[in-house]
Each structure stands twice: as structure tokens, then as C-alpha cells.
């Protein structure tokens, strides 16, 4: 395994160190990925929907991870996928979910000509940076073969925990501070007293005099030809119970009278009621 | 292809990120532009690390990633808090200090 890797690395090192040119495979990879990255970065600039912008940045970041691995930085490539694409971008998507996915940008300019000034500044920055980089051309790349001897993550660990130990500790403190800061900032003080189960129950009992019913509502009627939700049950007095039909059906007017389902029941009940009321009157 | 190509790509990505931060008004997209700029500098760091044959550049990129993660946490918390009070994620609506 290591022998094959050394055999593979040999010509690479020779070509990069002596000619300053990358191997053909890496060049092909670069020319495939670079346009993809630039186009999706422009997608961030021009996308109307925030989710599309976030997804194009995800694409840029994954392509960057591939480029890192191609550039002898496998540790950074993996960290890029885990930290950036995995954690940071998912955090962005969660916040998008909170803020509202359809929160699209307004294209009303508050500063006159901001679009053109911004584009001018951006293009100027690109021209200056590219010019500087091209002026610094003629780089004599050393390559990382000797620095990566014995595995890239291990060597990086030696540098971090050797030369940069103090910086590492400071960064750890920074992370803790950031986490605490985020918690403090998103914490919302309670303005009203907490309403729990006990408070809800007390409130319902207090509303008893206003007609609040504490028991479950009566079930809809069951008849010989219908046991559907839309027919009221009959109460002990023979009258249909309005509360036994779901409120939504009542509001929509989809309730059916008992007579629709069972005419004899309705008439018999009616007769019984008149009879019983007559008896009461006589008594 | 030489390593300069990587640096040119990093410069282009950095400029696109800067333009995004200048032009867009949605706070989240502005923030994504800043992330893109940080990523572009990371690419330059990794490339220079390879040029010099020295792992310090990769360690710097690593530190940039960590600081960016902390920055994202705090920044998104600020955006969420502002959204709660103003019901908007647009940087133009945060103008309480304006007379």
C-alpha cells in the first residue's frame, strides 16, 4: 500500500518540484470543478430564493473540499465537509426554516445606484486581486511530500499542538464563548406567567358558571341506518343533543336532523315528549 | 496548469463573496457571502501551504474554519433575534439608529 502510494507520489513530486506544473489528473479535476464553483458562487449572487443561494454555497464548499484533498490536504478536506457543509450550512438552513423559507430579497434600492457601485467595486476587487496573483506568478512550488511524511493529519496535529498550542487554547475559549453568547442572545425572558396543566384545569373549572362543560362531549347518535358523525344523539329527554355533533360540521351546516335518518324515532320521540309534558302538566 | 490557477480561483470567489455582501439585502445571504470569502481565503492558504512545502498554511486554514464556525453561531443568533423583534431579515429594516 505505502509502496504504491510512494510510487504514485514519486512522479507527482518530481513534476511539481521541477516544473511547477501539477499532474494532468489534478489539472482535469481543477478545470472541471473551477467553472462549477464560479457558476454556483454567481448563483449565490443572483439567486432570488435564499434556499437556492444556500444550496449553491453548499456546492462551492463541497468542491472546495475536493480541491483540498487534491492539494495534499486531506485533513482539511474532511474538516471542510464536516464543519462547513455538515454543520455551518445546516445551521444556515435551520435559521432559514425559522426565518421563513420564502423570505425573498427586495430589489428596491435604498441607496441610489447601489447595484452599479457594488458591481463596480466587486469587479475592481476581482481585477486587483487577480492582477496581484498573476504578477506574483512564477511560483516555485515545493510540494508537501516531505511535510506530509507519515500522514497529513498527524503532521498537522504536531504543528497545532506544538507551535500553535496557545492559539489552539484561545480558539477553544472562543468556541465556548460563542456558544454561551448564542444561548444568551436567543434566550427570551418570560413576560407572562407559565400556563401549565394545573392552571388550565383551574381556568376551566372557573368557567363552569359560564356554561363550560368539564366532562367529555356526548358521542354522535347511533341509529339502525346511520352511525355517522353528522347526526345528533338523543338525550334522556328525547331531544337531539346539539353538542354531540362535532363543532366544525355544525358551523359548516353539514349536520343532518334525526328525522333524515330515522323518521319513526323522531316522530315517536316527539309523541313521547308531548305525552310526558302532558302528564307533567296534569300532575 | 500551475498553482497560480488555484490562487486566481480563490481571488474570483473572494470577489464574488464581497460583491454579494455589498449587493444583497437579505441578512442571511450577506452572511453566506462572508462565508464564501472565508472559504476563498482558505483555498489560498492551502495553496500557499503547498507552494512553501510547509503545513503552517493548512493550520491557519483550520483556525479560520474554527473562527468562522464561532462567527456563524453568533451571527445567526443575532439574525434570529432581530427577526423576532422586527419580523424581517432584511438589513435595510434594521434602521432604529437612523433619525
Image (cartoon, rainbow, N blue to C red):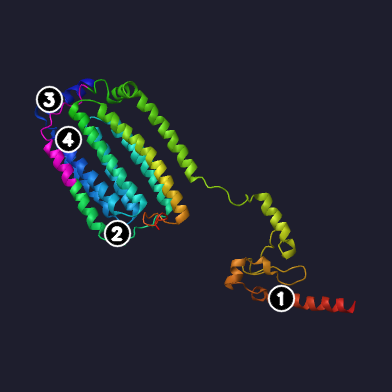
Seen at 43% across and 37% down, the residue is A178
Q: Where A217 sits versus A277, above or below?
A: above
Q: Distance between the residues labelled 3 and 4?
A: 15 Å
Are the residues at dot 3 and dot 4 in contact (C-beta closer than 8 Å)?
no
**Which of B34/A47 is in front?**
B34
Q: Mark 3 points at which residue?
A: A14
Across and down, in percent, residue A266 comes to 71, 75
Magenta region:
A126-146
Q: Residue at x 47, y 44 (%)?
A: A185
Pointer 1 with pointer 3, Cβ within 8 A: no
Q: Distance between the residues labelled 4 and 2?
A: 45 Å
**Residues indicated by labels 3 and 2 sit on the same polypeptide chain:** yes
Q: Mark 1 points at which residue?
A: A266
- Left or right? Give the position of A182 relative to A33: right
Q: How many marks can you see?
A: 4
**What subunit carries mark 2?**
A
Q: Mark 4 — residue?
A: A26
Q: Which chain carries label 3?
A: A
Of callouts 4 and 2, which one flags the residue occurring earlier in the amino acid sequence?
Answer: 4
- Up-down relation of residue A156 to residue B43 (above or below): above
Q: Is residue A7 located in the magenta-colored stretch of the structure?
A: no
Q: Mark 2 points at which residue?
A: A111
- On the image, the x and y values in percent for residue A51 come to 35, 52
- Label whose residue precedes the other's in the sequence (1 or 2): 2
Labels 4 and 2 positioned on one and the same chain? yes
Local packing at callout 1 (Cα closer than 10 Å; few below 14, some 14-19, many 20+) is some
A110 sits left or right of A33 in the view: right
Q: Say which chain tag 4 marks.
A: A
Amino acid at each position: 500500500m505505502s509502496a504504491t502510494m510512494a510510487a504514485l507520489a514519486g512522479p507527482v513530486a518530481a513534476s511539481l518540484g521541477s516544473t511547477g506544473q501539477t499532474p494532468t489528473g489534478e489539472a482535469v479535476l481543477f478545470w472541471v470543478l473551477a467553472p462549477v464553483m464560479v457558476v454556483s458562487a454567481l448563483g449565490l449572487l443572483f439567486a432570488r430564493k435564499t434556499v437556492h443561494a444556500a444550496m449553491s454555497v453548499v456546492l462551492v464548499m463541497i468542491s472546495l473540499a475536493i480541491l483540498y484533498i487534491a492539494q495534499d490536504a486531506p485533513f482539511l478536506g474532511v474538516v471542510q465537509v464536516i464543519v462547513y457543509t455538515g454543520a455551518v450550512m445546516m445551521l444556515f438552513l435551520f435559521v432559514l426554516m425559522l426565518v421563513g423559507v420564502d423570505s425573498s430579497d427586495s430589489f428596491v434600492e435604498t441607496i441610489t445606484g447601489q447595484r452599479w457601485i457594488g458591481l463596480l467595486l466587486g469587479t475592481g476587487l476581482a481585477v486587483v486581486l487577480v492582477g496581484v496573483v498573476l504578477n506574483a506568478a512564477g511560483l516555485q512550488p515545493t510540494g508537501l511530500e516531505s511535510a506530509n511524511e507519515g500522514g497529513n493529519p498527524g503532521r498537522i496535529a504536531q504543528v497545532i499542538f506544538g507551535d500553535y498550542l496557545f492559539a489552539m487554547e484561545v480558539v477553544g475559549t472562543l468556541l465556548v464563548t460563542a456558544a454561551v453568547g448564542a444561548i444568551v442572545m436567543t434566550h427570551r425572558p418570560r413576560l407572562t406567567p407559565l400556563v401549565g396543566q394545573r392552571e388550565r384545569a383551574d381556568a376551566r373549572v372557573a368557567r363552569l358558571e359560564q356554561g363550560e362543560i368539564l366532562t367529555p362531549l356526548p358521542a354522535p347518535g347511533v341509529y339502525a341506518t346511520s352511525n355517522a358523525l353528522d347526526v345528533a344523539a338523543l338525550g334522556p329527554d328525547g331531544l337531539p343533543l346539539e353538542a354531540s355533533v362535532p363543532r366544525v360540521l355544525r358551523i359548516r351546516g353539514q349536520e343532518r336532523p334525526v328525522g333524515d335518518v330515522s323518521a319513526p324515532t323522531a316522530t315517536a320521540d316527539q309523541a313521547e315528549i308531548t305525552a310526558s309534558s302532558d302528564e307533567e302538566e296534569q300532575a | 496548469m500551475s498553482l497560480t490557477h488555484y490562487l486566481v480561483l480563490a481571488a474570483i470567489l473572494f470577489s464574488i463573496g464581497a460583491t454579494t455582501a455589498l449587493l444583497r439585502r437579505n441578512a442571511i445571504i450577506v452572511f453566506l457571502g462572508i462565508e464564501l470569502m472565508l472559504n476563498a481565503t482558505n483555498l489560498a492558504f492551502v495553496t500557499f501551504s503547498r507552494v512553501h512545502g510547509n503545513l503552517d498554511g493548512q493550520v491557519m486554514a483550520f483556525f479560520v474554519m474554527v473562527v468562522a464556525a464561532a462567527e456563524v453561531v453568533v451571527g445567526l443568533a443575532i439574525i434570529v433575534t432581530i427577526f423576532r423583534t422586527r419580523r424581517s431579515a432584511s438589513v435595510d429594516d434594521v434602521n432604529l439608529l437612523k433619525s
